[in-house]
Image (cartoon, helix red, strand yellow):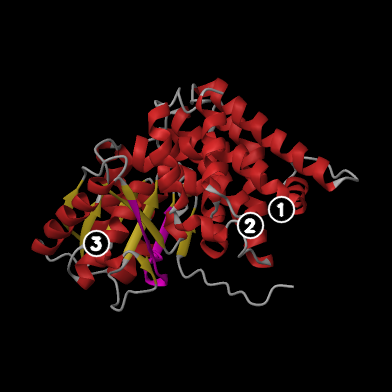
Amino acid sequence: MIDFFQFYSPTRIVAGKPGLLGELAPELAPFAGLRAGIVTDPVLGTMTYFRSLETSLTEAGIEVAAFYQDVPQDSDVDVVHVVRDLFTANRCNMIIAVGGGSVIDTAKAVNIVMTHGGDLRDYQGAHILTETLLPLVVVPTTVGTGSEVTMVAVVADSQDKRKLTLLDHRLSPTLAVLDPQVTFSLPPKLVAATAMDALTHALEAFVDLEHSPFSDLWAVAAADIIRDNLATALQPEGFAQARARLQWASTMAGIAFNHSMVGIVHAMAHALGAVAKTPHGVANSLMLTEGLQFNSEEVADRIADIGVRAGFVKAMSDTSATAQAMIAAVAALRATACRTTGMPETLAQAGVRRDQLPLLVERACEDGSLLYNPRQATDDDILQMFERVLDG
Ligand SMILES: [Fe+2]
């Protein structure tokens, strides 16, 4: 019996047909008169749809007061402080993020230091913010992060080879805009990696200690859509509708893990990002079935349950067999994604070296995501998982 749960998802979501960004003025009306600071990355800043967003901002009476388009793949505390200085100097009083998880989490972190002052490292932890944050409008451009609807930001501290986790309800974006158009120009490999991140969010949210009937619904829906659409979304023809659906699934999985959190797969993925700079989606893709296998000792019933409810497998009389079939189905989906796009299938293919394993284990073991995992892991458990994936 679950003792207690709550469901709070304050972000307004708008979604629609391709080109929504150019017709956004009515949705942006609540922010009329504000001075926006825009955060994005070097590639996205040149996209045509970006100009459509700027037209909508002008129509809504929002001035673009500052523009930062140099957020790297794994954003960093130093980047956050640079953007904070730029936006403060230009008297920005709202923030717009257009990008993947790194860009969105940078925007959330900038929002903290703009409103609270000081160094971002001072705010690592959960529910320690005290001030009202600036309005934050988010346009996710991948099909994985979910950060557009979560209260979490993860930012690297490169000096220390660590990831800072910042968690507070105040970090939930004000408005999330899902325009399918932004997914059409994504390389298939990025679609594959970010969709595997979203699938990991859904599966970890479902099996985690904090899951509830409310988070389960979003997790099942997201996993079902990803199973049904990932292969098509990677093909050169007919991918548009599949990518639009993956975009919805990514946001649904974000709502799921915002309530149930993530687990051991993310602990290992965060370590891979911090130590070896493995892209987050690739890291989750590499470690997902290992994490499921590890957890199946404790929660085979939950793995079997989402496997059946999300259409991966048919229920069998034996729960353990159903869970194993589910893990095999996830492995098969990932194998298809890897074969189609060239996404790495081993840590070695992703550039991870054996001599990095001790630090990877150390960083994974100190990651907060482990708190919510249904089975406790020792250093040795985690080392074995990394070793099994190192060379395949
Ligand atoms: Fe993730």
Disc 1 vs disc 3: which is toward the camera? 1
Spatial separation of the CA atoms under disc 2 and disc 1? 7 Å
Q: Earlier in the sequence, mark 1 or mark 3?
A: 3
Q: Is residue 292 above or below residue 29?
A: above
**Which type of secondary structure does the marked residue at label 1 adopt?**
helix
Locate residue 207, reporting x and y percent: 65, 55
Q: Secondary structure at mark 3?
A: helix
Report which quarter residue 36 is drawn in: bottom left
Q: Which residue is mark 1?
A: 298
Res. 243 in view: no
Q: Is mark 3 within 8 Å of ligand 1?
A: no
User: What is the span of residues highlighted in magenta in the rendered image?
Assistant: 163-177
Of the two numbered discs 2 and 3 in the rendering, the one whose residue sits closer to the viewer: 2
In the foreground, 118 or 216: 118
Give residue 204's position: percent from left, percent from top: 59, 52
Q: Quadrant of residue 225?
A: top right
What type is the residue that disc 3 sits on? Leu
Q: Which mark is residue 120?
A: 3
**What's the amino acid at mark 2?**
Pro
Q: Is residue 89 left or right of residue 328?
A: left
* Percent coordinates x, y for residue 388 in the rendering: 57, 30
Given the image, on which type of amino acid does mark 1 rest?
Answer: Glu
Where is mark 2, residue-wise?
Answer: 374
Give the Cα distance between marks 2 and 3. Answer: 31 Å
The alpha-carbon separation of the residues under discs 1 and 3 comes to 37 Å
Image quarter hosting the C terminus: top right
Which residue: 38% across, 29% down? 355
